Image: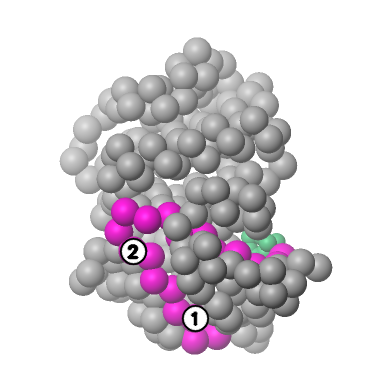
Amino acid sequence: MLKVDKLNQYYGESHTLWDLDLEVSRGECTCVMGRNGVGKTTLLKCVMGEVPVASGSILFAADVELTKRRVEDRSRLGIGYVPQGRQIFPLLTVEENLRTGLAARADGKRSIPERIYELFPVLKEMRHRRGGDLSGGQQQQLAIGRALVIEPRLLILDEPGEGIQPNIVTQIGEVIRKLIHEDGLTVLLVEQKLPFARKYADRFVIMDRGRQVAKGAIGELSDELIKQHLTV
Ligand SMILES: Nc1ncnc2c1ncn2[C@@H]1O[C@H](COP(=O)(O)OP(=O)(O)OP(=O)(O)O)[C@@H](O)[C@H]1O
Ligand SMILES: [Mg+2]
């Protein structure tokens, strides 16, 4: 579904991603892990076109070279993105926040799919409340809902569990599972929480200082790898 090949990225003089490879298979949840500042968010921003890449390729759906596509086009191709820190609009209502995602729909449909309210009943209950009045966990659910209004094929989430109460983290995990098994989505997740990755991811990729240093089925994520690359 997504194949990143030998990606290099710089912030000014600072070389952040080094010949980075990443493969995300259709119908699976792949979790990118790594300590703070190793380049996880930068990798996702390269995929979405929010930062330019120096070299390398990013193939989506077998044959679409994303690095040659404009930023606006990438979501239209069917990629939903939930950025780190949520970035919802605090002064808009929940429904208005969801509507902002509709502009990126390729088919021009302008109504919020009912499935989103089914997955997140709290968004329906609170659809007339302002985004800023929601709890952190509800805002994260709203950010995911907004990414889903385009009915993407690939959903990318950057640390959805960051700073959120455990029961909502679990609800989000269950939604990821439903999206994969009931809706046929593919998920690329950045998450540092080990129990969450172990429970909801099929495969892991570990990054260290801008490089891919390990990957495998989630069951192969050993204590040795964790000690070497994930614990501080
Ligand atoms: N806009 C920017 N300009 C310059 N340097 C940046 C910028 N954004 C990130 N960096 C640097 O690039 C490196 C990778 O940052 P990035 O945010 O991708 O890491 P991360 O793995 O997502 O970290 P975290 O776990 O804290 O979210 C860090 O050293 C960071 O300081
Ligand atoms: Mg990050």
The structure residue drawn at horizontal position 35% and vertical position 72%, both measured from the top left corner, is: 3
| Residue identifier under label 1 | 20
Colour setup of the view: one colour
Relative height, residue 186 to residue 48 (above, below): above
Quadrant for ligand 1?
Answer: bottom right
Q: How many marks?
A: 2
The answer to whether residue 34 is visible is yes
Q: Which residues are magenta?
A: 18-38
The quarter of the image holding the C terminus is: bottom right
The structure residue drawn at horizontal position 54% and vertical position 68%, both measured from the top left corner, is: 220
Residue 22 belongs to the span the image colors magenta: yes
| Residue identifier under label 2 | 25
Callout 1 amino acid = Leu
Binning the other alpha carbons within 10 Å of mark 1 as few (below 14), some (14 to 19) or many (20 upward) gives many
Q: Is residue 77 left or right of residue 30?
A: left
Q: Position of residue 38 (x, y in %)?
A: 66, 72
Q: Is residue 75 left or right of residue 52?
A: left
